[in-house]
Amino acid sequence: MTEKKDLTAAKKALMKSIDDVYEMYMWMLSLLVEITEYTSIDATERANKHLPTAEDKNPNLKLQLNKFAVTLKENPEYIAAVKKYRINWMADPEFVKAIFNTLKVTQEYADYLADPVNELEESKTIIKYIFRKIILKSHNIIQAFEDKFINWSVDKEVMQGMVAKTIKNFVSEDPFSNKLTPISQDWDEDGKFVEDLFVYTLKYDKDYQALIAERTKNWESERIALMDTILMKMAICELMNFPSIPVKVTINEYLDLSKDYSTPKSNSFINGILDKIMGDLKRTNSIKKAGRGLIEE
């Protein structure tokens, strides 16, 4: 009973970690919107200065009307997600203010304000600049994300890709016509795969460890990176339990993962060990694929 509870809790934590990536993505989109809206707050502060200049009295509010930001904040998916995750950057407005103050002294912002064009595609240029060159280089903002999301260092690249894709894919000024970037194109299927891979890897952990141990007898256990062992177990699990996934796809996928998440030498090490294990599994007819040709490398 305890093992079952532990597995249930572990699966819940896994799915929560995936949802965290989407929440992180939404916090970033919301920050972009808040920065554009901060234009009006800045304008009010400038107008209330003791000795406001002519520019202070008549500021350029083009960013507040940025077509991408306006379309995004009226998007139903965006509105629902902001509510779901209770996103509120203005609970600590200093974050938004600092980003805006950094932006407003840049040449890129001056050029944006000077350009009379305010079409949707043109509006994306300054948004991409704010995202890539200011937000992602702000120590305070990065620290805020690290404090909120424990897996920031691992997940940030996925989040960045989702934001970039969203900016690219927003092509209509009708907020109902654009779609946010999903965590997966088919989460019903992909979510089941993730959960099954997780469960089977844990269920047959000792068996997979024995296969790896047999082929790493000449290696001291402490010399094998823990991530290498985890990736090899997942690869073996996929080879043995997912008949529709070609062998070559599985091997290549885990070799790619090793480049991102393990040591510089892991790729060749994992490749060598998996190649030997593959031979063992083929000899015992332990790899059964549903389609013709799926077992060949």
Image (cartoon, grey):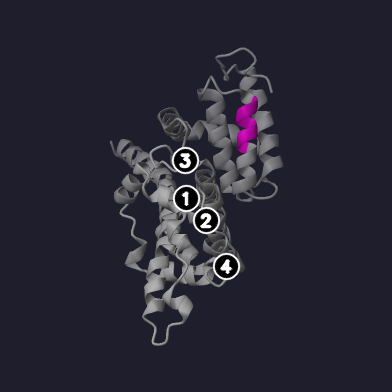
Question: Which residue type does callout 2 highlight?
Answer: Ile
Question: Mark 2 = which residue?
Answer: 127
Mark 1 or mark 2: whose residue is earlier in sequence: 1
The quarter of the picture where the C terminus appears is top right
Q: Is mark 1 on a helix, strand or loop?
A: helix
Magenta residues, as a range? 248-254
Secondary structure at badge 3 equals: loop
* Label 2: element kind: helix
Quick one: label 1, few (<14), some, or many (20+) residues within 10 Å? many
According to the picture, the residue beneath numbered tag 1 turns out to be 68
Q: Main secondary structure of the magenta part?
A: helix
Side (left or right) of 234 relative to 22: right
Mark 4 lies on residue: 110
Question: Mark 1 or mark 4, which has the lower sequence index?
Answer: 1
The image position of residue 192, as x and y in percent, is 42, 29
Q: Is residue 42 left or right of residue 118?
A: left
Farthest-out residue, left: 1
Packing grade of label 4 (10 A; few <14, some 14-19, many >=20) is: few
User: Nearer the N terminus, badge 4 or badge 3?
Assistant: 4
Residue 221 appears anywhere in the view: no
